[in-house]
Amino acid sequence: MKVISVLNKSYRPTLEIDNGKIVDNPEVPERLELIESFVDQNFEKLTFKKFPEFYVYQVHPEWYVKHIKKLSEKVRDNEYIPEFFLKDRILDSGTPIKNNTYFAALEAVNASLTGANALINGEKYVYVLTRPPGHHATVDFACGYCYFNNAAIAAQYLLNLSKTKICIFDIDFHHGNGTQEIFYENPDVLYISIHGDPEYYFPWVSGFKNEVGNGKGKGSNYNFPLPGKVEWNEYKECFEHALEIITLNNIEFLIVSLGFDTHKEDPVGDFNLDDGSYRKMGNMLKSLNIPILFIQEGGYNPDSNYRAAKELFYKF
Ligand code: OKP
Ligand code: ZN
């Protein structure tokens, strides 16, 4: 496996509002630094490349991208939390704006495109270790620590250059409402997500079982909402089912939206997976024997993130 690591260490959101209280924003660089030193020691690195903004515009309209840029430029030393959410194209307090928000979000997109490009050039497994994450970013709204949808932009890039379907398998604890929405009517991008039931967990409004795609995309969207505290045995059933769907669909490239917030020691997610669960997931993904682009999403405990990554990637 090859790795591209772009952690944007000077980008640090500080606040969000949770349950009526101002709390620390957990989407900070430290969450991924132990993984970074692990991959540094164990895998070959890819060189970061910058791609034309054209690729961002294939998913997000130009005005939205420029809007995030303009908001970032307006902020100086402090941090801006929207006062009027719809005007700011932001859906929740988890996406405050710093003066380097636009820069960091665009670097994460370019890291993901660098990874996608490596797959096109014949690399079989690539891990994009980056932040901010992307799977909650819709076509034109930021939320849940996400501004631009890294996985969706990478998928669109691969789609331009591939003959058959792409799959995005989202195993972050949270449903990737943005990714689902972006490809909801697209039959060429299969979206499969296993996540905490949105009745009880962020993003609240999507990720239900009856969301199966629309128009030509009907039947290419699969949600597996699970109750809190699930253990590997129950989780595994969904994971196996997802892999069956992937196998049946003759997928050319697989993108894994990879969140380690499913670990029982994660402070944000609420599942009970342990280190061993990740080793099993790694084995099962490897047995698909297709090219995989892993793109980092959530995971907020530096130490359990590290152990999860170490187990998941031990065969890659
Ligand atoms: C991002 B990712 C409400 C607090 C809820 C949002 C969680 C976002 C998770 N403002 N926090 O999918 O790991
Ligand atoms: Zn998450």
Image (cartoon, grey):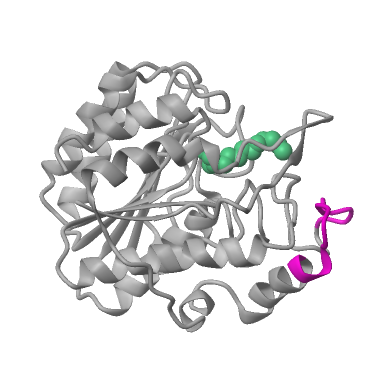
What x and y, as percent, mark residue 202?
A: 62, 36
Total marks in image: 0
144 relative to 112, above or below: above
| Residue in the image at 43% along x and 78% along y | 51
Q: Main secondary structure of the magenta part?
A: loop
- The C terminus: image quadrant: top left
Give the magenta-colored segment's residue range.
72-85
Does 91 sit left or right of 307 as displayed? right
Can residue 180 be spotted in the picture? yes
What x and y, as percent, mark residue 258?
A: 38, 43
| Residue in the image at 36% along x and 74% along y | 157
What x and y, as percent, mark residue 126?
A: 26, 55
| Residue in the image at 52% along x and 22% along y | 270
| Residue in the image at 31% along x and 79% along y | 160
Does 257 sit left or right of 276 as displayed? right
Q: Nearer the viewer, residue 296 or 251?
A: 296
Instruction: Using the rendered view, name the quadrant where residue 89 is placed.
Output: bottom right
Q: Nearer the viewer, residue 125 or 216?
A: 125
Can residue 186 be spotted in the picture? no
Instruction: Using the rendered view, name the quadrant where residue 253 is placed.
Output: bottom left
The verdict on residue 83 being magenta is: yes
Q: Nearer the viewer, residue 8 or 283?
A: 8
The verdict on residue 95 being magenta is: no
Does 121 sit left or right of 231 as displayed? left
What x and y, as percent, mark residue 77?
A: 82, 56
284 relative to 148, above or below: above
